[in-house]
Amino acid sequence: MKVSSLCFVPIAATLLAACGSDSTAPNEPLRIATIIPASGLLAGGTTVTIIGTNLIDVTDVTIGGMALGDRTVVNSEEITGTTPPATSTGTKDVIVTSNSRGSSVCSGCFSYRSVRTSQIAAGSNHTCALTNAGIAYCWGDNQNGALGCGCANYDPPVERR
């Protein structure tokens, strides 16, 4: 009897030690902490970074109910992408959904704004607008470098300073 109890104790101690070494609880829910920047143009196209925790197995990211464009899960704490266009100004909810961690809603975390223009100039396939604040936005065909952004084509407005 002594032999069997001596064999049993080391095995039980080894199993308990192995189970107790895992400090991360499985399937902790994801959480959105912030979105940077917190505002962008009504036309969409703003590059954003969503910061949070447990951003794992992400299946969907929306702003105001519309899918985030060019979504990239950088790591378990960061997602990048471009904002979709919106139909109205104001604050919108940001929702991140995971197939293993549930969903998280950041209520009113992103705000769409419109821009007041003072001048507009149009080419045959591109347009530029100058805001009252002196910032130029350009969009359309950049075949001959008309947008000044080094890009091929860019439909959402590109801020040019």
Image: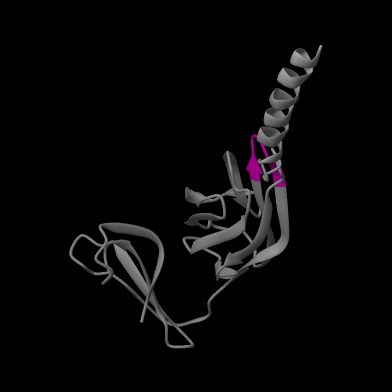
Q: Residue at x 36, y 82 (%)?
A: 161
Quarter of the view holding residue 124: bottom left
Name above or below for residue 118 compared with residue 139.
below
Quarter of the view holding residue 16: top right
Q: Position of residue 106 (x, y in %)?
A: 71, 58
User: Would residue 142 be counted in the magenta stretch?
Assistant: no
114 or 103: which is nearer to us?
Answer: 103
Q: How many marks?
A: 0
Name above or below for residue 119 compared with residue 58.
below
Colour approach in the figure: one colour
Task: Looking at this view, name the residue that lies furthest to the left.
Answer: 144
Quarter of the view holding residue 9: top right
Is 125 displayed left or right of 119 in the figure? left
Task: Looking at this view, name the residue that lies furthest to the right.
Answer: 1
Q: Residue at x 53, y 76 (%)?
A: 115
Q: Position of residue 100 (x, y in %)?
A: 66, 35
Q: Position of residue 7 (x, y in %)?
A: 71, 18
Q: Residue at x 25, y 57 (%)?
A: 152
71 or 143: which is nearer to us?
Answer: 71
Is 57 displayed left or right of 127 in the figure? right
Is 58 displayed left or right of 12 in the figure? left
User: What residue range appears in magenta?
Assistant: 97-103
